[in-house]
Image (cartoon, rainbow, N blue to C red):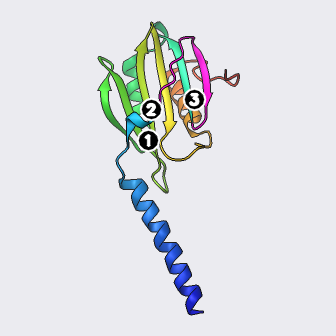
Amino acid sequence: MKILTIAVAVILLAAACVAVYVRLAPVRIAAVSLLPKNAPGDYALPGGHYAVRPLETVDLAALEAEIAATVRTRQVSGSPNDLPMIFVHRSLVWGFPDVTRVWVEADNVHIHSHLVFGNSDLGVNRERLLSWSTGLGLEGLVTDGTR
């Protein structure tokens, strides 16, 4: 019984250490690679989602406000006049960070939302992009026919 109690205590301590690390470790934004695409569309990526839209169809100030209003989101840098805009989103329970970058290149707005830890975001980043699309009235920001 004593060994079982010690094993449970060790497991709980390890889980607590992981939780503290995930919440307090600095988010290395540069570690999240960018895969620029020039054609407007939606691109599923392992651990994230990438959307490209023509600049004339996106109000960058409204997009910034929509992203910043997302729960558990902190804007790290940038503005519509000082791109790129970078946001960090944290999951509710463990506080896993995801990073969203918004920038303009070749007359297109690029929105890349990606996890920092792990291999799968369980579709959370795609859902965020869909939520922002709905909030801004941008039909097709995220489509079911992901390229």
**Residue drawn at (53%, 34%) of the image:** 128
> What secondary structure prevails in the magenta region?
loop
- Label 2 sits on residue: 100
Residue 142 horizontal/vertical position (percent): 60, 24
**Residue drawn at (48%, 49%) of the image:** 91
| Amino acid residing under circle 1 | His
Helix, strand or loop at label 3? It is helix
Residue 30 horizontal/vertical position (percent): 39, 34
Badge 3 density bin: few <14, some 14–19, many ≥20, Cα 10 Å: some
Q: Is residue 68 visible?
A: yes
In which quadrant of the rendered image does the N terminus lie? bottom right
Badge 2 density bin: few <14, some 14–19, many ≥20, Cα 10 Å: many
Residue 89 horizontal/vertical position (percent): 43, 41
Q: Are marks 2 and 3 in contact (CB under 8 Å)?
A: no
115 magenta-colored: no
**Residue drawn at (62%, 43%) of the image:** 122
Q: Earlier in the sequence, mark 1 or mark 3?
A: 1
Q: Which residues fall within the magenta stretch?
A: 33-47
